[in-house]
Image: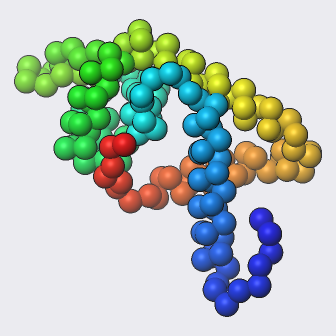
Amino acid sequence: MKHRTTTRDTVSVLADDLRLAVARLVRQLRQHNNTGTPVTLTLRSALATLDREGPLTPSELASHEGVSAPSMTRIVRRLTEEGLIDRDPDPHDGRGYLITVSAEGAAMLRSARLGGSNFLETRLRQLDRRQLELVPVAIEVLEALLAESPTEDQDS
């Protein structure tokens, strides 16, 4: 981060710098995560959560993703249309269903992860030792920021 002289407080400056850095990183990851499918980051995030957490109800997935039930309904519909998830009856609730990642969804996630991981690995190898040692701390901070984030209600 470049040091800037400003009348704004340090947290405001950090917030702006972090927002810009994360936006740039996300843009670069999108370029390297190209899976050839019209899957948005929101859809990919929901799919990755399903892959990590196992079968979930739509409500559980909405809670994990921090979105409203109506938004999750749209996300599940789009993932179903793309053939990336399977829906099975919930054995504990005859009216509900559980969502799992389909074989096609798992293949798409592997492809996206490989592209993004290769990009990040290449970039991490370019850091000096001090910077590389700070990466676990940065990850911890980002995870803390995410844990405290308000519910987001977007599906694209």
Residue depicted at x 34% and y 55%:
151
What kind of colouring is applied to the model shown?
A: rainbow
Residue depicted at x 65% and y 41%:
28
Residue 139 coordinates in the image, percent (x, y):
66, 47
Q: Describe residue 125's horizontal placement relative to residue 76 as left or right.
A: right
Residue 38 coordinates in the image, percent (x, y):
42, 28
From the image, which quarter does the C terminus lie in?
top left
Outermost residue to the right: 129
Residue 122 coordinates in the image, percent (x, y):
80, 32
Question: Would you identify the image quadrant in which residue 55 lies?
Answer: top left
Residue depicted at x 44% and y 58%:
149
Residue 4 coordinates in the image, percent (x, y):
77, 79
Residue depicted at x 86% and y 35%:
125
Q: Describe residue 70's horizontal placement relative to residue 28 as left or right.
A: left
Outermost residue to the left: 95
Q: Is residue 131 above or below residue 60?
A: below
Please state which of residues 98 and 40 is positioned toward the viewer in this rendering: 40
Please state which of residues 96 and 14 is positioned toward the viewer in this rendering: 14
User: Is there any visible trace of residue 60 in the rendered image?
Assistant: no
Question: Would you identify the image quadrant in which residue 42 lies?
Answer: top left
User: Is there any visible trace of residue 52 in the rendered image?
Assistant: yes
Outermost residue to the top: 103
